Image (cartoon, grey):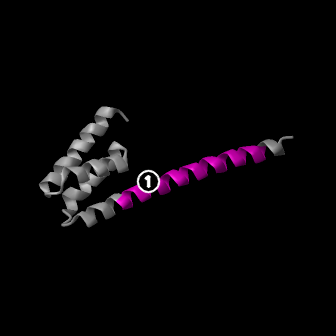
């Protein structure tokens, strides 16, 4: 991820929130919380498609996206740990 990608995604998010008449500060907070351009673009897509009526709906979606990202990271870490453990077991069998 480049800083430019993040800024472009953030600007897109701010524009979508502006169209829906939400404050720019909300967009700044959401962009920082989500962190990655991909997640920010996903949030922008949600705003375009759903057109939420209140900030609570926007924040709920941000939390849902964050939760899915965290679950994906935990899954990847678990898969990596499992792969290392399997390698360890295989190396012990070779002795």
The one nearer the camera, 67 or 72, is 67
Q: Could you tell me how many numbered marks the image carries? A: 1
Residue at image position (43%, 59%) is 67
Residue extending furthest toward the right: 95
Q: Position of residue 25 (x, y in %)?
A: 23, 50
Left or right of 67: which side holds 8? left
Where is 58 relative to 81, above or below?
A: below
Residue at image position (82%, 44%) is 92
Left or right of 72: which side holds 24? left
Residue at image position (21%, 42%) is 11
Residue extending furthest toward the front: 25
Quarter of the rendering occupied by the C terminus: top right
Residue 72 among magenta residues: yes
Quarter of the rendering occupied by the N terminus: top left
Q: Position of residue 55 (x, y in %)?
A: 24, 63
Residue 18 among magenta residues: no
User: Magenta residues: mostly which secondary structure?
Assistant: helix
| Secondary element at image label 1 | helix
Q: Position of residue 37 (x, y in %)?
A: 33, 43
- The residue singled out by tag 1 in the image is 69
Left or right of 77: which side holds 83? right
* Magenta range: 63-90
Query: Quarter of the image holding residue 88?
Result: top right
- Mark 1 residue crowding within 10 angstroms, few (<14) / some (14–19) / many (20+): some
The one nearer the camera, 4 or 89, is 4
Residue at image position (21%, 64%) is 52
């Amino acid at each position: 991820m480049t800083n430019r990608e993040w800024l472009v995604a953030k600007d897109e998010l701010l524009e979508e929130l502006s169209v829906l008449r939400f404050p720019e500060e909300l967009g700044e907070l959401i962009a920082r919380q989500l962190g990655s351009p991909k997640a920010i673009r996903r949030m922008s897509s949600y705003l375009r498609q759903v057109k939420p009526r209140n900030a609570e709906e926007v924040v709920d979606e941000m939390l849902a996206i964050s939760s899915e990202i965290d679950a994906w990271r935990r899954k990847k870490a678990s898969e990596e740990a499992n792969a290392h453990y399997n390698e360890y077991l295989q190396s012990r069998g070779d002795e």
